[in-house]
């Protein structure tokens, strides 16, 4: 049928068409303000971050430590049995060098998001955060890193209480898969 | 339900927003409907001969049979109040002393939702004929607000 | 194909105006645990598919389906999200089981309305962005206009609508899940502040938080899981014109059509005769009257009179919203229909405690998605 | 009683464009209207309507499924909108499938639409709102991040090079040159063009990514007894599958999409397919990024782990190969109006099996084809297997 149809619908506009007033349009902006209840798991995670601790939780059945903490294990559906304070070190699971911001503005120095497997959590369990104090060319999967915290009096109970993770000297014994 | 206790210092809620900003094109029907409203002060509908429906505001498709509509009709600028309400709340949920009078003004098988003006609240009733009061041509931009309000004929 | 499908487990957190101690995930988990326990199933082992109902802007998250699986026990399983009411969710689970591909399916819906700080503005973002939103109107105006036209055409009165509020809030006093029960009079309702005339503030349901989970099963599984399966006799849903400009302002045609679909499946010709108990949408009081007429329980204009006469009270001809409805239990956003169905299941099981209605065998739940939608659904259940 | 058989009997689509003038409703209607005409049905023949669109933020309307419903033909019909993020486009025909397979419906209209350009100034910004509001959104994440990180993990784990991956973009964009609705078809694009394109989020470069687009696609599904009356060339839905992995995407290995494998196994089981790499003759894996096509081919068990690039380098994936991959041109070439892009793959298989794909027509008599989509936080796989 694509072979038979000559003209498919769909009128393509350029940005210039809007500027030139060639077509009619309007704008709107949602005023969407939320206060999401943090609950037991994430509330405790945020409270720990304020104290400079990354919190996980432990599932007795699956013998796993997960991060961020939750009150149930999604794999066995049993209640998690305890919160576990984790180290603020870990290894880079993967990363990117990003030259555009979230709203697609071009930047010179890349943002370096990474998934960091947190020490004390089960293998391949980590969080997303940023890398800093590092030459982008030097970053490798498997590299060891440590959280750089905001000063205690500036911490608010937020994932941004960690400024970023920076490389640490200590040699990794982990393989990237671990 | 849970074996874990919430940290007593846990923040109750995390505050944030859903950043949604949009630009809407008026589309195939809207382009002609609002150009005509703006430039000529006329209200247009489209007719579906299959379903014998005249849609106001105009649409390029019949919602009943999905036929393409290209029979445009001028439906005048006055219509009957099909229903109305006295709205005592603002967009943000706050209450207002004096209500806004909002009506659905029937044109053919459709109509327009708009404000009523030039009328006492007690005098508004279903079935009343009202007419579009247009903004001056120079102030019209191609918008439903090119009609200032509807007033009794 | 599995012809017959039953509800075999239900779970609910109860409803409150705020729930600061739980995240939405933890709230859903609580309801899910109760439902799985009620059904005697392990979600990881037994539940084969999961259906959730949610709207992005109610959650403050885009593609919210991302956040649905874990608390339901659905991780790495067939999970889907419907942007519909809870009854659409049940209809989906019903279809999934009827295909023969699935034996046990869970349905989830919840509300964290208290977390939406700008709910009126969020709701207004559902209006047509070109034709309606530039007027910057609170969406209650749609209910006000609809009520006005409904009263005009049906001959119902504001007193009739107020009687719905009085009944439902009184019923809610016997429902421990319902936060908005009250013993008030028609005068109390009518003398309250005006929301969007003729609609009064006291005729609009306040919002509440809460979660509901249900477990559905094929006939074979249902019989082995429970002594009290609640069978789905019919499931219908329908939309009307979404635009304010082309719709019928007086009638809930979507509800009438959804009911016809459900009645056809259930083989019901005379609903008043066949159905023993009803839970209908009452986000706004007039909607209960409009729904009862659309469902064919009476002619247009009669529902109000029947309500004033007490015909829809718990111990009368057709008990309607014995739970307290949304006016008593709260508006639960996308979970409203699940709350309606939940009460019907309790009643048909004989587990409704002090508000148990006697001799009920067939019940009907109906829902509407709220302004500005024209989306309704109907579910017919039997014990 | 056995399972009811369901066929695709009609299809329609709009062009995929960067900024459409049509409203979301109008785009939806154009596709639905064309699908009806393609099989000479009217709305009276349609029992129910299924609709798919990804986040409401794009079209910029809360309850977007309700707003767009008239364009999809939902007027006084049973109507539902489903979504599983980016997987929606291949999920919505699954939704149509279970409507019919349940026995409640005979003929269902299935429509998917996305108007990403309504999000202003840039659709990418809307993606920040897919991240967890408390634990991730404060980092101001960019959608490119997670793709780039997943791509990096995939490359690192299996030792795959950028050039291995870039050949996907080259082939898909070349295929798309023959698609009349394509936004980024290019018959002359080279590996070098891709490898030298602007770096967005290393390892992701400009030509590794499908473009933000507007568009709509519709297909009509019918139960067996009706399908045979509507057309002498129904294309059967032989298997469907979908799986959603845990939300906690930083708690699992990104190198392999196990949720795609689970979804595929579900679909293969239903279709009675035991050796997918031999029995699937056309594959339309989801390719919003070039590496994703490879990643998905492995999850679909059409290639061994880390070996998917070989399908492209040895010619298997080409239009005349043993298993042509994305003959449509995929998202990389035709465009990526999220939900519509997935359904485009279903429409492509429909046209391919009917011999109506024009210059994209694959030779011979393929028996089974597969379309797959993916989405959410690298989390969901949706799979449909079709055949004649």
Image (cartoon, rainbow, N blue to C red):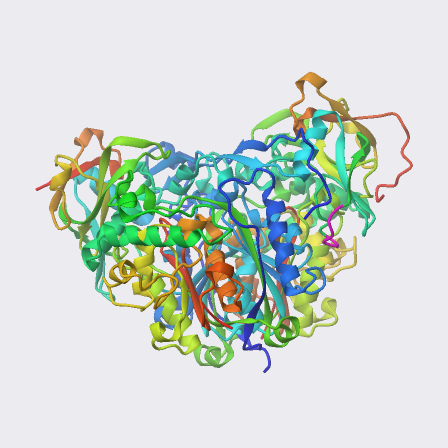
Q: Can residue B99 be seen in this view?
A: yes
- Residue D375 in the image, given as x and y percentages of width and height: 61, 50
- Between D164 and C330, the one nearer to me in the picture: C330
Dividing the picture into quadrants, the one containing residue C298 is bottom left
Q: Say above or below: A41 vs A111.
A: below
List the single residue furthest toward the left: B153
The answer to whether residue D201 is magenta is no
Image quadrant occupied by the C terminus of chain A: top right
State how many labels appear.
0
- Residue D5 in the image, given as x and y percentages of width and height: 55, 77
Dividing the picture into quadrants, the one containing residue A57 is top right
Q: Say above or below: B89 vs D86.
A: above
Dividing the picture into quadrants, the one containing residue B55 is bottom left
Q: Say above or below: A18 vs C346.
A: above
D90 vs D272, left or right, is left
Secondary structure, magenta segment, majority class: loop
Q: Residue at x 38, y 68 (%)?
A: C259
- Between D371 and C55, the one nearer to me in the picture: C55
- Residue C217 in the image, given as x and y percentages of width and height: 60, 69
D88 vs C118, left or right, is right
- Between C340 and D301, the one nearer to me in the picture: C340
D75 vs D8, left or right, is left
Q: Residue at x 12, y 34 (%)?
A: B118
D188 vs C182, left or right, is right
- Residue D370 in the image, given as x and y percentages of width and height: 63, 65
Boundaries of the magenta span: A75-80
Q: Residue at x 66, y 18 (%)?
A: A154
Q: Can residue B110 be seen in this view?
A: no
């Amino acid at each position: 049928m694509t072979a038979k149809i000559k003209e498919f619908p769909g009128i393509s506009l350029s940005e210039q068409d809007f500027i030139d007033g060639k077509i009619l349009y309007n704008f709107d902006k949602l005023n969407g303000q939320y206060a999401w209840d943090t609950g037991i798991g994430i509330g405790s995670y945020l409270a720990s971050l304020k104290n400079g601790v990354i919190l996980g939780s432990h599932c007795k059945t699956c013998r796993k430590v997960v991060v961020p903490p939750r009150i149930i294990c999604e794999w066995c559906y049993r209640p998690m049995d305890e919160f576990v304070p984790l180290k603020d070190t870990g290894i880079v699971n993967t990363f990117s060098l990003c030259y555009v911001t979230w709203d697609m503005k071009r930047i010179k120095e890349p943002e370096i998001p990474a998934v960091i497997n947190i020490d004390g959590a089960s293998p391949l369990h980590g969080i997303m955060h940023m890398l800093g104090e590092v030459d982008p060319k030097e970053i490798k999967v498997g590299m060891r890193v440590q959280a750089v915290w905001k000063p205690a009096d500036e911490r608010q109970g937020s994932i941004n209480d960690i400024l970023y993770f920076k490389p640490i000297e200590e040699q990794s014994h982990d393989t990237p898969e671990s | 339900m849970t074996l874990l206790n919430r940290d007593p210092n846990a923040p109750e809620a995390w505050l944030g927003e859903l950043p949604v900003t949009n630009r809407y094109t008026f589309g195939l029907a809207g382009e002609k409907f609002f150009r005509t409203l703006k430039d000529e002060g006329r209200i247009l509908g489209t007719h579906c001969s299959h379903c014998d429906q005249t849609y106001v505001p105009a649409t390029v498709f019949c919602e009943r049979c999905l036929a393409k509509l290209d029979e445009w009709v001028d439906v005048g600028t006055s219509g009957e109040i099909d229903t109305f309400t006295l709205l005592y709340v603002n967009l943000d949920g706050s209450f207002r002393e004096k209500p806004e009078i909002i009506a659905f003004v029937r044109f053919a098988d459709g109509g327009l939702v708009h404000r009523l003006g030039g009328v006492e609240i007690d005098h508004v009733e279903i079935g009343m004929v009202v007419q579009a009061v247009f903004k001056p041509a120079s102030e019209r931009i191609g918008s439903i607000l090119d009609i200032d309000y509807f007033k009794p004929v | 194909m599995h012809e017959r499908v039953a509800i075999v487990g239900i779970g609910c957190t109860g409803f409150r105006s705020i729930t600061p101690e739980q995240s939405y995930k933890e709230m859903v988990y609580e309801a899910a645990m109760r439902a799985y326990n009620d059904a005697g199933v392990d979600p990881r082992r037994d539940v084969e598919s999961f259906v959730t109902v949610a709207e992005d802007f109610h959650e403050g998250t885009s593609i919210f389906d991302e956040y649905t699986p874990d608390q339901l026990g659905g991780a790495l399983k067939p999970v889907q999200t419907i942007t519909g009411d809870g009854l659409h969710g049940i209809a989906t689970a019903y279809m999934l089981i009827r295909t023969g591909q699935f034996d046990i399916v869970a349905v989830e819906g919840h509300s964290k309305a208290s977390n939406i700080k700008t709910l009126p503005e969020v709701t207004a973002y559902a209006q047509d962005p070109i034709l309606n939103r530039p007027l910057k109107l609170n969406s209650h105006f749609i209910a006000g206009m609809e009520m006005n036209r409904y009263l005009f055409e049906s001959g119902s009165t504001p007193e009739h609508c107020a009687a719905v509020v009085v009944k439902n809030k009184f019923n809610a006093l016997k429902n421990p899940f319902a936060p908005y029960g009250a013993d008030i009079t028609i005068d109390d309702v009518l003398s309250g502040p005006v929301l969007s005339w003729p609609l009064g503030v006291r005729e609009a349901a306040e919002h509440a938080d809460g979660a509901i989970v249900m477990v559905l099963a094929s006939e074979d599984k249902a019989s082995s899981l429970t002594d009290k399966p609640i069978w789905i006799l019919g499931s219908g849903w329908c939309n009307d014109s979404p635009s304010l400009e082309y719709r019928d302002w007086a009638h809930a045609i979507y509800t009438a059509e959804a009911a016809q679909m459900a009645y056809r499946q259930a083989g019901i010709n005379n609903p008043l005769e066949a159905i023993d108990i009803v839970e209908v949408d009452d986000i706004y009081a007039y909607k209960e009257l409009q729904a009862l007429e659309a469902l064919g329980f009476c002619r247009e204009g009669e529902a109000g009179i029947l309500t004033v006469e007490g015909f829809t009270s718990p111990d009368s001809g057709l008990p309607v919203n014995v739970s307290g409805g949304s006016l008593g239990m709260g508006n639960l956003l996308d979970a409203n229909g699940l709350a309606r169905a939940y009460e019907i299941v309790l009643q048909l099981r004989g587990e409704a405690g002090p508000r148990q209605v006697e001799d009920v065998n067939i019940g009907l739940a109906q829902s509407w998605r709220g302004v500005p939608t024209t989306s309704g659904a109907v579910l017919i259940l039997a014990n | 009683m056995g399972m009811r058989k369901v066929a695709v009997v009609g299809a329609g689509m709009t062009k995929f464009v960067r900024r459409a003038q049509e409203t979301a409703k109008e785009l939806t209607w154009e596709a639905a209207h064309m699908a009806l005409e393609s099989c000479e049905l009217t709305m009276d023949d349609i029992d129910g309507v299924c609709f798919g669109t990804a986040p409401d933020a794009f079209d910029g309307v809360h309850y977007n499924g309700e707003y767009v419903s008239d364009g999809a033909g939902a007027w006084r019909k049973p109507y539902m909108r489903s979504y599983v993020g980016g997987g929606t486009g291949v999920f919505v025909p699954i939704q149509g499938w279970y409507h019919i397979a349940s026995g409640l419906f005979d003929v269902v209209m299935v429509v998917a639409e996305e108007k990403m350009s309504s999000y202003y100034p840039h659709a990418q910004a809307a993606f920040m709102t897919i991240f967890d509001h408390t634990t991730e959104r404060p980092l101001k994440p960019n959608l490119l991040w997670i793709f780039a990180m997943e791509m990096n993990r995939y490359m690192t784990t299996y030792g795959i090079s950028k050039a291995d991956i870039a050949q996907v973009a080259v082939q898909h964009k070349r295929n798309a040159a023959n698609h009349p609705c394509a936004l980024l078809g290019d018959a002359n694009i080279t590996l070098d063009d891709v490898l030298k394109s602007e770096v967005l989020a290393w390892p992701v470069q400009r030509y590794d990514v499908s473009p933000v687009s507007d568009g709509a696609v519709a297909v009509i599904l019918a139960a067996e007894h009706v399908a045979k009356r509507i057309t002498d060339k129904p294309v059967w839905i032989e298997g469907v599958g979908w799986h959603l992995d845990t939300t906690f995407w930083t708690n699992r290995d990104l190198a392999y999409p196990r949720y795609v494998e689970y979804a595929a196994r579900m679909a293969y089981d239903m279709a009675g397919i035991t050796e997918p790499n031999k029995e699937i003759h056309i594959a339309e894996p989801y390719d919003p990024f070039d590496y994703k096509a490879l990643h998905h081919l492995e999850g679909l068990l059409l290639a061994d782990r880390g070996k998917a690039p070989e399908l492209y380098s040895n010619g298997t994936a080409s239009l005349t190969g043993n298993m042509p991959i994305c003959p449509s041109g995929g998202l990389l070439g035709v465009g990526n109006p999220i939900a519509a892009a997935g359904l485009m793959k279903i429409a492509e298989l429909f046209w391919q099996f009917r011999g109506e794909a024009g210059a994209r027509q694959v030779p011979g008599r393929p028996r089974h084809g597969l379309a797959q989509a993916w989405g959410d936080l690298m989390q969901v796989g949706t799979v449909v297997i079709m055949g004649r």
